[in-house]
Image (cartoon, rainbow, N blue to C red):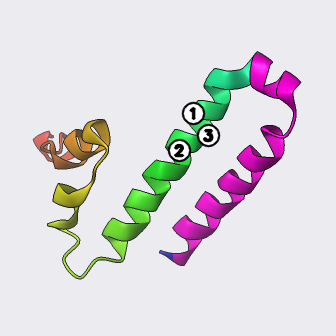
Amino acid sequence: VEEVFLVRELLNSLGERLVEDPHVIARHLEALQNLDRASQILEHLGSILGAEDPGAAPQAVVMHDLRARLLRPSSANDG
């Protein structure tokens, strides 16, 4: 769990550095938004992994698309 939060902090730090340059923002806005989304996803995953009941924790995820992916039946068991 700590490693997930560490990676999230690294991404946040990178994003903060990049947004200091208006030229980077202008040229790479979508990529910067994806960095932010990745950071949010890692925050949720870290919270789930560290939850008292990790099986129920995805219900509390506020990112609708992530929650839907986490709650869908796994196709890994379909053979």
Q: Do callouts 1 and 2 mark residues in contact (Cβ within 8 Å)?
A: yes
Q: In this view, does 9 lie above or below 53?
A: above
> Mark 1 highlights which residue?
34
Q: Is residue 47 above or below residue 71?
A: below
Q: What residue type is labelled 2?
A: Ala
Q: Which mark is residue 35?
A: 3
- Residue shown at 23%/71% (left/top)? 54
Q: Is residue 15 magenta?
A: yes
Q: Is residue 23 above or below residue 6?
A: above
Q: How crowded is mark 3: few (under 14 residues within 10 Å), some or many (20 or more)?
A: some
**SS at mark 1 in the image:** helix
Q: Give the range drawn in magenta.
A: 2-26
Q: Do callouts 1 and 3 mark residues in contact (Cβ within 8 Å)?
A: yes
Residue at the top extreme of this rendering: 27
Q: Label 2, label 3: how many angstroms apart (C-alpha)?
A: 5 Å
**SS at mark 3 in the image:** helix
Q: Do callouts 2 and 3 mark residues in contact (Cβ within 8 Å)?
A: yes
| Quadrant for the C terminus in the image | top left
